[in-house]
Image (cartoon, rainbow, N blue to C red):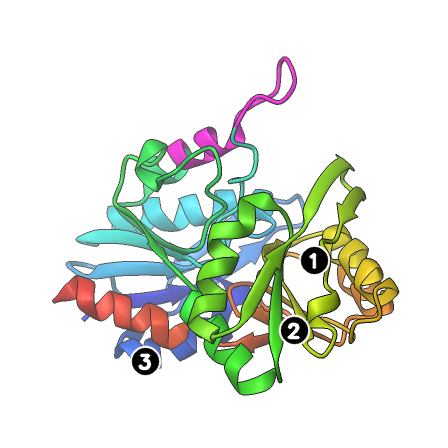
Amino acid sequence: MSLLFSYPDNEEQAVLLAKEAGYELGAIDIHHFPDGETLLQLETDVKNRDVILFCSLNQPDSKAMTIMFFARTAKELGAKSVGLITPYLGYMRQDKRFHEGEAITSNIFAAFLSQHFDSLITVDPHLHRHKEMKEIYTIPAQVIHAADAIADWIKDNIDKPVLIGPDEESDQWVSDVAQRAGAAYTVLTKTRHGDKDVEVSVPDVDQYADHTPVLVDDIISTARTMIAAAGHLKDAGMKPPACIGIHAVFAGDGYEALQEAGAGKIVTCNTIPHPSNEIDLSRLLAEHLKEREG
């Protein structure tokens, strides 16, 4: 039986996963000194055990040193293997050098995690220019997809949905969720001028006047794309949209701004702890772990 440890921010999700997968929960103590340094102590014996750390890597800069300390310490204390379950995997969006001199941080962060962990599992990472995880990770890096869970939530909670993707890049993913939910779909045209400056054009939606629009995206960060789309849908006379994201990053005032923009409901998967979490992926993760372990 694998031994599952949780980063402090993810204890609720780790408990759900341990229950679904039949894993033992390990105890870890993390203390931050006034000068910013960290003391980490594994309070459960890891010798000859397969060890897994559950840590979602939003705000990754504040967690990177701690998870490295965990992996190195577990190996020094005799763990057979040290894996990482990170439902949200940060640093995947900077996948090219957009301007001269920029770091391609998706590659650098992948090398960092590959150096310290033996395996990785994540949920729908932002794969755009990188088509597969193995392009940048040198350890087994497996991807779990949330499409079924999102489609089930839509079927159970939305009357006559029409799914709306944020941009042309989302077409394949949105169409997949729509097919699973038995719903119509369309996609927006998006031009991003800056972090909070997004221009969105909405296709003809007159045919969906009696439907409930469902805006879906993998990551909701500043929420500016959804805010712009919600405004266009309102101008078109449609119902307030349900806004669904896999990863509730919600940088800055993104969540509050989306609420104020007239979203009918804001729903996310529990890859990052947030009040909008309504779609639990613990069973999906547990099923994958059981299949992997045979």
Q: Is 224 contained in the magenta span?
A: no
Label 1 is placed on what type of residue? Answer: Phe
The correct choice, above or below, for 76 with respect to 248 in the image is above
List the residue tagged with mark 2: 276
The Cα atoms of the two marked residues, 3 and 1, are separated by: 28 Å
Secondary structure type for disc 3: helix
List the residue tagged with mark 3: 20
Image quadrant occupied by the C terminus: bottom left
Label 3 is placed on what type of residue? Answer: Glu
The Cα atoms of the two marked residues, 3 and 2, are separated by: 22 Å
User: Can you tell which of label 3 and label 2 is closer to the viewer?
Assistant: 2
Q: Which residues are magenta?
A: 96-111
Q: Is residue 100 left or right of residue 2?
A: right
Label 3 close to label 2 by CB (< 8 Å) = no
Residue at point 41%, 79% (across, down): 16
Give coordinates of residue 152: x percent, y percent: 46, 79
Q: Residues within 10 Å of mark 2 (few under 14, many from 20)?
A: some
